[in-house]
Amino acid sequence: MENFRLPKGGKIEIAPSILSADFGCLADEIRQVADCGLTIIHLDVMDGHFVPNLTMGPPLVKNLRSHFPNLILDAHLMITDPDDYIEPFVKAGADHITFHIEANGEPEDIIKRLHDMGCSAGLCVNPVTPVKDIEEFAELCQMILVMTVNPGFGGQSFMAEAAKKIIDIRKMVGPDVRIEVDGGISADTAKTVVEYGADTLVAGNAIFGKADRKKAIEDIVNSYRN
Ligand code: DX5
Ligand code: ZN
């Protein structure tokens, strides 16, 4: 397998979502979580069409890339036509790109194009989407992303039923593919998803919504270690 910057599955990583950060001092916000040892930064890209919100595009990724050359930039594309935008995001410096199975385009082609550009590929399922919809593409991916909220906004409540899909996906993909879980992850919910088999925990509000980021991260880590 190609040498992607996203590490293969196994070690549990917390990926802070900057959606809940203060964009007015974004570099400082990211530096705080990087100083706590976190290496994967989750970027929520929304097009105002696939989801009813607008966030960031390739120019921001380009700036983050130049400020933080060593961090792994994990772009979650909540956009209707990922095929049209993967190249600008890779050129801007995204290390990993996840797109939705519910979006337009041929998943296999998009995954192959990402690999040809040296970028690892992820496929995301919304809470209502069954696991079988990604079955034929899962083994091509480096990551499967399980949404535990309806995408569009940070700070929503964890959907426990949707998280159970992680169990079946872990059986399907084996240990090397990362399973990322996104939405309502906190010190109250992290242990459950880790037990189900997730190894990449997106946390927005549970980190950037707290004044003490170091303690917020430690609280999450301690919740699944104990
Ligand atoms: C939701 C995004 C999430 C979100 C997570 O559409 O994909 O990454 O920012 O935020 P919290 O952790 O606050 O639920
Ligand atoms: Zn996300």
Image: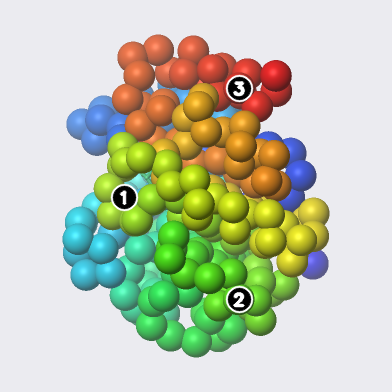
Q: Write down the residue under mark 1.
A: 60
Q: Is residue 187 positioned above or below 66 on the image?
A: above
Q: Position of residue 129 (x, y in %)?
A: 47, 69
**Residue at 72% in and 57% down:** 170
Crowding near pointer 3: few (<14 within 10 Å), some, many (20+)? some
Quadrant housing the N terminus: bottom right
**Residue at 35% in and 46% down:** 63
| Earlier residue among tags 1 and 2 | 1
| Earlier residue among tags 1 and 3 | 1
On screen, residue 150 versus residue 173, left or right, reads left
**Residue at 35% in and 63% down:** 78
Q: Position of residue 156 (x, y in %)?
A: 32, 41
Amino acid type of the residue tagged 1 in the rendering: Leu
Crowding near pointer 2: few (<14 within 10 Å), some, many (20+)? few
**How far apart are the alpha carbons under marks 1 and 2?**
34 Å
**Residue at 41% in and 26% down:** 207
SS type, badge 1? helix
Q: Write down the residue under mark 2.
A: 132
State the residue in front, 165 or 177. Answer: 165
Crowding near pointer 1: few (<14 within 10 Å), some, many (20+)? some
Q: Write down the residue under mark 3.
A: 223
Q: Position of residue 114 (x, y in %)?
A: 56, 73
Q: Is residue 138 positioned above or below 163 on the image?
A: below
Query: Residue 193, located in which quarter of the rendered image?
Result: top right
The mark closer to the camera, 1 or 2, is 2
Cβ(mark 3) to ligand 1 < 8 Å? Answer: no
SS type, badge 3? helix
Residue 67 in view, yes or no: no
Amino acid type of the residue tagged 3 in the rendering: Ser
Amino acid type of the residue tagged 2 in the rendering: Lys
On screen, residue 62 versus residue 221, left or right, reads left
| Earlier residue among tags 2 and 3 | 2
